[in-house]
Image: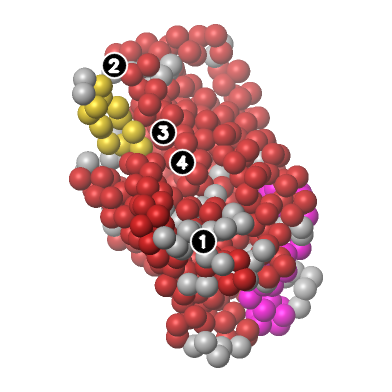
Amino acid sequence: MNATTLLIAVGVVAVASAVAMLRPRISEQRIATDLEEWALAGRSHGPLMLWCVLGGTIYTAYTFLAVPGVVYSSGGLGLYALTYTTIVYPLVLVILPRLADIARRHGYVSGVDFIRGTYRSPGLALAIALTGILATLPYIALQLVGIQAVLAVIGVTPDGLLGDLALTAVFTVLAVSTYRYGLRAPSGVAVFKAALVVGAAIVLALLVSGRTDWSDVWPAAENVLHARGLHLVVAPGNATTYATLALGSALALFAFPHVLMVAFSGRSRHVVARTVPALLVWTLVLGIFAVMGVVALAIGVVPTPGRADQVVALLVQQLAPPWLAGGLLGVLVVTALVPAAVMSIGAATLFARNIYVEFVNPEATNEQETRVARSMSLLVKVGALAFALGFHNQNAIQLHLLGAVWVLQTLPALVLGLLPRVPARSALLTGWLTGMVSGTAMVTHGGFSPTVTLELGDTRLTVYAGLLGLTANLVVVAAVQAASRLIVVPVRRRETT
């Protein structure tokens, strides 16, 4: 353990934690009694702030560590993350501004509120809310897994007492700040994160340039992968796997409740529409981090077996002097703070609005609703911390994989609700159940593999299980709709227009 590296890293995290605890200009009493203020920062985010918060939420600590790790371990197939974070934005640009506009006009704080108002179905809303919560919880735990990977490189044993105390300290500050200020707490950190991550990407590129010739990196990495039977260029036989993983991941990305919630915090639909294309800058930064997986192969970085997510941190330690390594590793820890906070707010808001108020206490005041959401945000973080400390990292990865498949099954209710004439709620519920069961079965039957192999005569296609589950979902929605002869739900029954 290098003392300088550790102290600088702690200093960077401490500054980020202090930013999270800064008191916002708005009255703390108002935040504590108004769910819209607590969960959506009063829908006050302009283009720059929304870009920082939305990008800081989507591009998580685990993203910046896992993508180069997958490139390191699997070659070019790992670059599918860059593809899906590129193709997702044209899709999102069609849908997200409209949803944000509807949410503002009707006072919705979550995508489930939109579904409840569109279909007038508490049962369908409950199914979607529970799916969103279950899909989000392991995602929060994954942020801790990312922090553990960085701590291990610094020399703080993740499974030891010091590692547990470090995680607990970071999440305690995060929990307190989020409880008090809601989305305003990670919003301040998001600006800090954006500046640090962009700066870290530039510094990493300069460090590599000073160590080796870029023209030598690709052949050296290809030689290492070739010895394993892999390549940096995706083989034609893996094209279907690559394409379905990219498309399925793109569709799942904006279906997560915390992403929708942040979009609803925008000042207007035009702010959301202007912000979405600019998120490609985050993809560019992610691309620099992905290339670090190639560099790690070329210069012989060797992570702990089974922990390819350590390669960026190890590369930093190998290339940078101790003081600079501490700063860069501190940045990697900070990248976990924004998504973890926002995810906990999203899950807590779903519970308070769509479960507690809907089924437990329909007469709850806005103050009671907000109090429940704040308390649940603490409970969610404590649960994620306990999971990360008490279970193997692979459990969190497997559950997140399953969560992504699950959250895909909420898309039909969300997207089809924007049509002038919407499907019957019975068709959507049946489709959701079909997608959940089939998707879960495919993932777990394959030993928690994200893909399944289909045999069509002499042709074998390996495709993303979540996309197959979504296809089954949509087929059943269409079949049930046709069989029931309930082609439409009358528009007059909708809250939304």
Kindly check if marks 2 and 3 are in contact, taking CB atoms under 8 A apart as contact.
no
Q: Nearer the viewer, mark 3 or mark 4?
A: 3
Disc on res. 488: 1
Whichever of labels 4 and 2 marks the residue nearer the N terminus, that label is 2
On residue 249, the disc is: 4
Q: Label 3 crowding class (10 Å Cα cut-off): few <14, some 14-19, many 20+? A: many
The residues colored magenta run 28-55
Q: Which is in the foreground here, disc 3 or disc 1?
A: 1
Residues under numbered marks 3 and 4 in contact, where contact means CB atoms less than 8 Å apart: no
Tell me the element at label 3. helix
Kindly identify the amino acid type of the residue bearing the numbered disc 1.
Answer: Val
Residue 221, x across and y down, in percent = 42, 15
Q: Residue at x 38, y 62 (%)?
A: 484
Q: CA distance from mark 4 to mark 2?
A: 26 Å
Comes first in the chain, label 3 or label 1: 3
Q: Is residue 198 above or below residue 44?
A: above
Q: Are marks 1 and 2 in contact (CB under 8 Å)?
A: no
Q: Which residue is mark 2?
A: 229
Q: Which mark is in front, 1 or 4?
A: 1
